[in-house]
Image: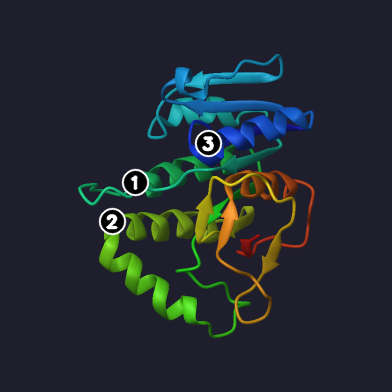
Amino acid sequence: MRVTVFGGTGAIGRLVVQRLLDDGYQVTALVRTPAKLALTHPRLTVITGQLSDAAAVGEAVAGADAVISALGPSLKRSATGTPLTEGTRIVVEAMEARKVTRFVGLATPSLADPRDKPHWKHRVLPVMAGLLFPNALADLKGMTRAVTDSGLDYTLARITNPTNRPAAGRVRAGFLGHDRVGSAMSRADIAAFLVSQLTDTRYRRAMPAISN
């Protein structure tokens, strides 16, 4: 299977790329700065380009069987604009034009899935994020909507508190108010979950919350 990765130089993205290669996938990564990926492999193709460059995004998506996005917004309070929203729209358009349907990415419990029941995270997290990181929340909302409003076969994993702890090898996944899902999760386990969704059909067109 050929998988295209966006956000491959981030803390989770690098782990996603490595996990894919370890599992035998053919990987294409679109990155702005290849040196940040710090990885070479016979099954890894690195394309240098911006997420805003439709031609580069199209080149990265061409021939893929699936896309994994490890993109996340800037948490700097000085950040402005919604680059991830615009970039994700470009990715979605490129996928639809090339008939690539499977999209796996990240989201936040600040946004509800229709399968959720009322939960404290629905009340608390949007308020906290709106106060501390209003621009990041707006970009996350737009990025998520670009995917969920499309016809793509998506899974968006909602994460709350990613950590740098070693992989625990166990995952809780489900819907708020239904399933026992916590908040903290190692980035290594997040990456493993994203890769697992390439072949797992339980959360198609859904946004499961995940934790350790």
Q: Secondary structure at mark 1?
A: loop
Total count of labels:
3
Q: State the mark number for residue 74.
A: 1
Label 2 near label 1: C-beta < 8 Å? Answer: yes
Label 1 packing within 10 angstroms: few (<14), some (14-19), many (20+): some
Q: State the mark number for residue 135.
A: 2
Q: CA distance from mark 2 to mark 3?
A: 21 Å
Q: Quadrant of the N terminus?
A: top right
Q: Nearer the viewer, residue 125 or 137?
A: 125
Q: Secondary structure at mark 3?
A: strand
The residue that appears at 62% across and 15% down in the rendered structure is: 40
Q: Secondary structure at mark 2?
A: helix
Name which residue type carries label 2: Asn
Q: Is residue 75 above or below residue 117?
A: above
Name which residue type carries label 3: Phe
Q: Nearer the viewer, residue 99 or 183?
A: 183
Q: Quadrant of residue 99?
A: top right
Q: CA distance from mark 1 to mark 2?
A: 8 Å
Q: Is residue 64 visible?
A: no
Q: Nearer the viewer, residue 149 or 186?
A: 186
Q: Quadrant of the C terminus?
A: bottom right
Q: Residue furthest left?
A: 78
Q: Which residue is mark 3?
A: 6
Q: Quadrant of residue 43?
A: top right
Going from the N terminus, do you reach mark 2 or mark 3 first? 3
Instruction: Describe the colour scheme in one phrase.
Output: rainbow
Going from the N terminus, do you reach mark 1 or mark 2 first? 1
Q: State the image coordinates of residue 17 (x, y, percent, origin top left).
A: 63, 31
Q: Nearer the viewer, residue 188 or 1?
A: 188
Q: Is residue 89 above or below residue 59?
A: below
